[in-house]
Image (cartoon, rainbow, N blue to C red):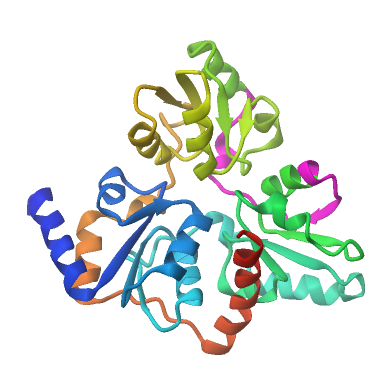
């Protein structure tokens, strides 16, 4: 079936199901183009909560659809491919975190969980953060409790430096952002002289220290739009390049070449396709289902995040 007819079918099914399609900025260009909303984790969490619909189709990875389901228990949440996982989420199993907290209960940790984690981890957290709001939210953390930041050690270290507060960091990382190295950034600077380096805080410190600006994917758009520069080196998953070129026309955006492949792509994000999006709307499956008591526990820190992000 031609792409155009699949697109038409998706639009028809979306109307029939009273559905809204959310897509993360790392999704394939054709999925971003058909989505009702495209953004990062915080923006999409807010859109999911505010959407007037019966069905939410989340084109992203599993924890994102799970988050939409936590915030929208009365709606059906679909994920085009249930195998769309996340290496960062996998680096912090809920049972391991529960064991750590039990073994260190005398410390009374204030648990800050990056949204890239499972519902089980969210249920153990005091508050959730994204790369776009971690500094703001950690500034509100109780001064008399030590902070445990899970699961991303790179975002945690960057935020700790921004806030000026020591934190215990879980040893987790995103496999895509972990691939970027100092030498690759220096090579990109040589290939594109004068282009500011814009990097995601999930990158390693050696990369962040070479960047002209460190920010979330959503804030990259504003920075590049407002900057006087007309060319940028973008250090994150390459899906964001499509959106940058759409929203900031007339400027050039260059990915960083990494070893063993030409660009940094998340194979899990790219599992979702137009065909799978069409099929999930047609079949109303796969449905993301959550155990209600666990959902309620995970909802509290998520709502705290959304309240603090207003």
Is the C terminus in the top left, top right, bottom left or bottom right quadrant?
bottom right
Q: Nearer the viewer, residue 240 or 117?
A: 240
The answer to whether residue 132 is left or right of residue 246 is right
Which quadrant of the view contains residue 200?
Answer: top right
The residue under the point 28% across, 51% down is 31
Magenta stretch containing residue 4, yes or no?
A: no
The residue under the point 82% across, 77% down is 102
The residue under the point 55% across, 16% down is 189
Q: Nearer the viewer, residue 217 or 284?
A: 217
User: For the magenta stretch, what is the residue range?
Assistant: 161-182
**Visible in this render: residue 258?**
no
The answer to whether residue 284 is left or right of residue 184 is left
**Visible in this render: residue 166?**
yes
Q: Residue 242, image x and y in percent?
A: 35, 37
Q: Residue 52, image x and y in percent?
A: 35, 72
The residue under the point 71% across, 35% down is 205
* Residue reaching furthest to the front: 310
Magenta stretch containing residue 170, yes or no?
A: yes
């Amino acid at each position: 079936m031609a792409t155009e007819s699949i697109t038409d079918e998706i639009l028809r099914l979306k109307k029939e199901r009273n559905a809204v399609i959310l897509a993360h900025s790392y999704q394939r260009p054709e999925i971003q183009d058909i989505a009702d909303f495209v953004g990062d984790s915080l923006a999409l969490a807010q859109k999911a909560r505010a959407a007037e619909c019966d069905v939410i189709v989340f084109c992203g990875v599993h924890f994102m659809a799970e988050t939409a389901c936590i915030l929208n228990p009365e709606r059906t949440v679909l994920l085009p491919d249930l195998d769309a996982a996340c290496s960062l989420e996998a680096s912090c199993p809920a049972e391991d975190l529960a064991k750590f907290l039990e073994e260190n209960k005398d410390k009374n940790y204030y648990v800050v969980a990056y949204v890239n984690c499972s519902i089980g981890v969210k249920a153990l957290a005091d508050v959730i953060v994204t790369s776009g709001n971690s500094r703001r939210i950690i500034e509100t953390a109780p001064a008399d409790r030590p902070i445990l930041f899970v699961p991303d050690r790179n975002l945690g270290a960057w935020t700790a430096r921004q806030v000026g507060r020591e934190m215990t960091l879980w040893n987790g990382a995103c496999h895509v952002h972990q691939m970027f190295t100092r030498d690759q950034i220096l090579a990109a600077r040589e290939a594109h002289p004068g282009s500011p380096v814009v990097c995601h805080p999930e990158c390693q410190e050696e990369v962040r220290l070479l960047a002209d600006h460190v920010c979330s994917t959503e804030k990259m758009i504003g920075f590049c739009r407002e900057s006087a520069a007309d060319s940028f080196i973008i250090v994150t998953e390459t899906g964001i390049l499509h959106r940058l070129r759409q929203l900031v026309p007339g400027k050039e955006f260059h990915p960083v070449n990494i070893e063993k492949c030409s660009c940094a792509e998340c194979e899990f994000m790219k599992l979702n396709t137009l065909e799978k999006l069409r099929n999930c709307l047609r079949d109303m499956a796969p449905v993301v289902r959550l155990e209600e008591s666990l959902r309620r526990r995970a909802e509290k820190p998520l709502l705290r995040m959304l309240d603090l992000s207003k």
